[in-house]
Image (cartoon, grey):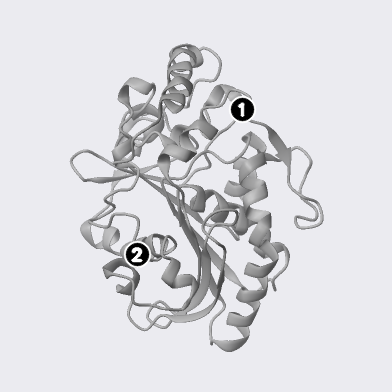
Amino acid sequence: MHQLASSHRTASLFLATVFLFAGAIAAPVIIPRQSITVLSASQISTYKPYTYFASTGYCSAAVTKAWNCGANCNANAGFEWVASGGDGDNIQYWFVGYSPTLEEIIVSHQGTDTSALLPVLTDADIDQVNLDSAHFPGISSSVKVHDGFANAQLKAAESVLAAVNTALSKYPTTKVTLVGHSLGAAISLLDSVYLPLHLPSTITYKTITYGMPRVGNQEFANYVDGNTHIHLTHINNKEDPVPVLPPLFLGYIQPAGEIHIQDSNAWDNCPGQDNGSDKCSTGDVPTIFEWDVSNHDGPYDGVSMGC
């Protein structure tokens, strides 16, 4: 479990106060419990290959094509590396490759240490910015995203696009799946907006993320939900605080597509944006008093993030 430094606790204590009153400023939509469905064991199992790929995003060995870095990295047999990059610091690790089992191109981005991410997410001065028009042509100026996440995605955007193009030309597939955990999840969601703007319309996409923070404003969430290329599923574990940050009152909102893992380990399909039911993250973790940072890394169906 990651430990928060004293400065991080100060930011969290500040947020505890504003969380107690945030409901009066931006209340989440509560969808009746009967609308929330529970995934079967067979449905849950379909996500495990992607969970391993998201975990492998943390592995420096994946960047060096040395696919011998532990159980999580080696879990998807036969994976064919295409390209990778990042330094694990200024630029998050990333890799692109082909899964012959899934018959999909996989794009994965590294997450980050929770103790480093939380202060960024709890800062009351978090800026929202427009997406870079050169990389995101045609996106409305009403769509705004977290400044730090936008910068992190741009650092590798062109390299990732080139790698995906290479993979598509090399392998017999038109399917691209983007995965990531934590900060890597935010980058992957932005990639899912970016890549379709530059690749042929015949390509189909899925975006599967874990412990993803809120990335943008209402218009961004609406764009994600209304864009047929994105197909977002974001999986959140128990009382992980990251998916409910930055807070609603700062103008951030989660798109639809949440799956919330309960304390019982049941996986609930939560319809709508920021579902306020206590069966879903927004309703289950309304204030800092419900936070459990140790839930952020999993396990997700037995898989914990990291190498």
The residue labelled by disc 2 is 52
Q: In the rendering, at what x and y percent does residue 13 appear? A: 43, 18
- The amino acid marked with disc number 2 is Tyr
Q: Secondary structure at mark 1?
A: loop
Q: CA distance from mark 2 to mark 1?
A: 32 Å
Residue in the picture at 66% in, 64% down: 195
Q: Is residue 272 visible?
A: no
How packed mark 2 is, by other alpha carbons closer than 10 Å (few <14, some 14-19, many 20 or more), is many
Query: Position of 2 compared to 130: left or right?
Result: left
Q: Nearer the viewer, residue 235 or 66?
A: 66
Q: In the rendering, at what x and y percent does residue 220 appear? A: 64, 41
The residue labelled by disc 1 is 251
Which residue reaches farthest front? Answer: 6
The quadrant holding residue 176 is: bottom right
Q: In the rendering, at what x and y percent does residue 208 appear? A: 45, 57
Q: In the rendering, at what x and y percent does residue 125 appear? A: 63, 25
Quadrant location of the N terminus in the rendered image: top left
Q: Name the disc covering residue 204, or none.
A: none
Query: Position of 173 compared to 73: left or right?
Result: right
Residue in the picture at 37% in, 80% down: 101
Q: Secondary structure at mark 2?
A: helix
The quadrant holding residue 236 is: top left
How packed mark 1 is, by other alpha carbons closer than 10 Å (few <14, some 14-19, many 20 or more), is some
Q: Earlier in the sequence, mark 2 or mark 1?
A: 2
Quadrant location of the C terminus in the rendered image: bottom left
Query: Position of 160 compared to 177: left or right?
Result: right
